[in-house]
Amino acid sequence: MKKVKALLSAATAAVLALSLFGCAVKDAGNDPAQSSDPAVQGIEMSVAALKGPTGIGMVKLMQDSDAGTTTNKYSFQVFDSPDNVVAAVSNVDNPVQVAAVPVNVAASLYNKTNGKIQVAAINTLGTLFLLENGDSIQSVADLKGKTIYVSGQGATPEYVLDYILTSNGIDPDKDVDIQFVADHATLATMMVAGEADIALLPQPNVTTVLTQAQDVRIALDLTKVWDDTNKVNGKEGQLSMGCIIVNKEFAEQNKAAFNKFLDEYKTSVEYVTNETNLDAAAQLCETYGIIPKAAVAKKAIPDCNITYIEGAEMKQNMQQNLQILFDANPKSIGGTMPDDAFYYTR
């Protein structure tokens, strides 16, 4: 079976993005916020979070917002997929100003909206793992001749796998049989049922499989493999999978307030990634619908690579990642490499 390079996810995001952030919201509300800085008083900000790793870093901020202890006023929406996020931020009647999306979707939106969004921070590094029902896979070389099930056709998982295979002398079209599955949950179910022996999945789906199928193991950590491959290729930068985007006009008109969001979001990330808060963070993931069960979240969070990277380091990492995706298929990031205006600076 030949691998079909479908780009449905990217295409959907591109179509929906044409009206993205068409109506930026300016300062709203008359009630004073807690800050004494008039530039951040009364700002209401609508934020979209994704279920899974890219949303984990927001859970403490969600709790603080509900408690009324944040400087800004936040309205959070949690969605199942990047396409749902794009649809939400495209809604002119109730626009979302800030969102967490995959790195390639952010670049695609920037291109398709003529620079109406910016990326402000990397919030998730590599979360991909190759699972095997058996013990035949010890290195990338062992994948030659194998059938690999993948969820994420036309998105980051496919291109990460392509880059790693190609860099290790394996032709993705000829040397392996790649079978694409509709979504992560379906592939996880297939692994548990024994219908797939080798699968590429992200967290927390990996944890779900491992807790239900005793014979399945992690064969390869693709974040580590990515880093090793980059060293061989003379490249720098970590595998970046998720980021925070902002409506450019909103950020320009409410810069102090948005910078305060970034500060509060960073504090939330630091809370979640502190191992002493693992139980509480896991429960918050369940409470806010980011991960269905706290028990799964507790096991998954340490492997989700939740982070906060902004500024020059963010730009370097994202440029390196986007260049690899662009080389694999320019359409995966909207056709062209984003210019410097893509990157938000304080």
Image (cartoon, rainbow, N blue to C red):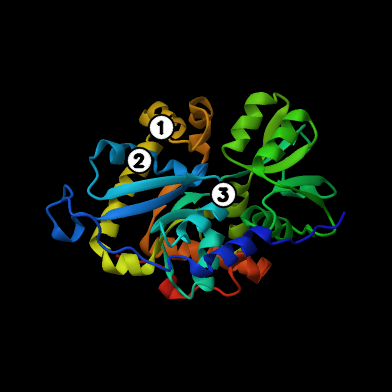
Q: Secondary structure at mark 1?
A: helix
**In whole angstroms, how far apart are the C-alphas of marks 1 and 2?**
9 Å
Closer to the observer: label 3 or label 1? Answer: 3
Q: Is residue 222 at all visible to an observer of this figure?
A: yes
Label pair 3/1, CB-CB below 8 angstroms = no
The amino acid beneath tag 3 is: Ser
What residue is pinned by disc 3? Answer: 81
Q: Is residue 297 left or right of residue 70?
A: right
Q: 320 or 36: nearer the eye?
A: 36
Label pair 1/2, CB-CB below 8 angstroms = yes
Residue 161 on image: x %, y % = 69, 54
- Residue 284 is tagged as 1
For disc 3, the neighbor class at 10 Å (few under 14, some 14 to 19, many from 20) is some
**In whole angstroms, how far apart are the C-alphas of marks 3 and 1?**
20 Å
Residue found 39% across the figure and 46% down from its top: 76
Ranked by sequence position, the earlier of labels 1 and 2 is 2
Vertical side of 252 occupied by 86: above or below: above
Q: Residue furthest front?
A: 93
